[in-house]
Image (spheres, grey):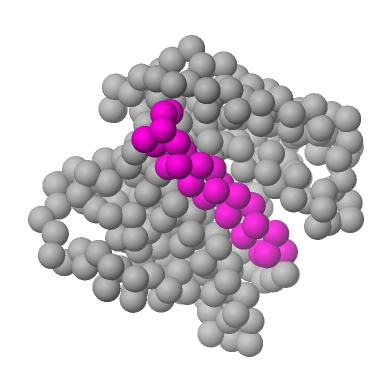
Amino acid sequence: MKQPKLIDYLLLTILALIWASAFFNIKIATYSYGPVTIAFLRVFFGAIPVLLLCYYKKIKIEAFSKDWHWFAMIGFINLVAPFFLIAYGVKSVQSNLAAILMSTTPLSSTVLAHFYTKNEKFNLIKTIGILIGFSGIVFLFSDNLLIDENNFTSALLILLGSTCYVVGGVLTLKISKKKNENVTGSILIWATIILIPFVSFIEQPWNLNPRLDSTISVIYLGLVSTGIAWLLRFRILINNGLIFQSQVSYLIPIFGTILSYIFLKELITFKVLISLIAVCVGIYFVRKADYQKTI
């Protein structure tokens, strides 16, 4: 891969800001919409830019090919379940907590890769990173100012949502030879199909009288945080590789915490800061081990 230039670091920062901004926008969306509706609108609006790009680049969408069951399964695990769980959880906890909890994805994926892949085993540096990162999450759950018996389950559901991303990522390896745009477009199509009956029978959003800010936020979540963010991720991956793109993991919890304070005035406690630092340090050690393996 080429040596990263200023524009590459700028695009990486923009991607981190887009993904980090999703958390406070989810919080705003929950003011008017239920978690199923938020998940549905995210995948529906998210599919638009991806499918338009596939049409422009003449990339065949294989959502209904012989591999449809993989697309459907990944669509459920990698989109439907986490989008629902995060929206459900954020309704009861601060969005900055969600940003920190979701940032454990690289740590969880390292643990899962140890058991399900042949060349991603633990070493000393990775083990230290995982222990530091998850210690930060355990410490975060001890913050009684932000997590108590009323929202403890909601925080756990967000953490479960991050695990769904990891499992979905492992399943994506089954169809890793296909174009990224095709895979993303196909799983978004299946996620939309899966959510249609749920949103129709459970929440029936057409009966709502939503706030304008909630509507803007949910459209933003779909078009920008889901659709455009994935396309930007593709560009960074193609030009700079996975190791460079994975650095976004450090920035998301930091930006998520800052943005939640700016837009929602959410409380940032001492334990939140310590947990944030621990998670970022943990990710750093895990990424350092991956980088050393490639050189």
Image side of residue 133 versus residue 255, left or right: right
Picture quarter with the N terminus: top right
Residue 233: percent from the left, percent from the top?
56, 49
Out of 140 and 278, give the one closest to the viewer: 140
Q: Is residue 164 magenta?
A: yes
Question: What residue do we see at 82% from left, 48% from top?
Answer: 114
Question: What residue do we see at 70% from left, 47% from top?
Answer: 109
* Furthest residue toward front: 149
| Span highlighted in magenta in the image | 147-173
In the rendered image, is residue 18 in sight? no
Q: Hey, which quadrant is residue 23 in on the image?
A: top left
In the rendered image, is residue 193 in sight? yes
Dominant secondary-structure state across the stretch colored magenta: helix
Residue 234: percent from the left, percent from the top?
58, 54
Q: Is residue 68 magenta?
A: no
Question: What residue do we see at 52% from left, 32% from top?
Answer: 100
Image side of residue 167 versus residue 285, left or right: left
Q: Is residue 235 above or below residue 103?
A: below
Out of 239 and 222, give the one closest to the viewer: 222
Image side of residue 34 versus residue 230, left or right: left
Picture quarter with the C terminus: top right
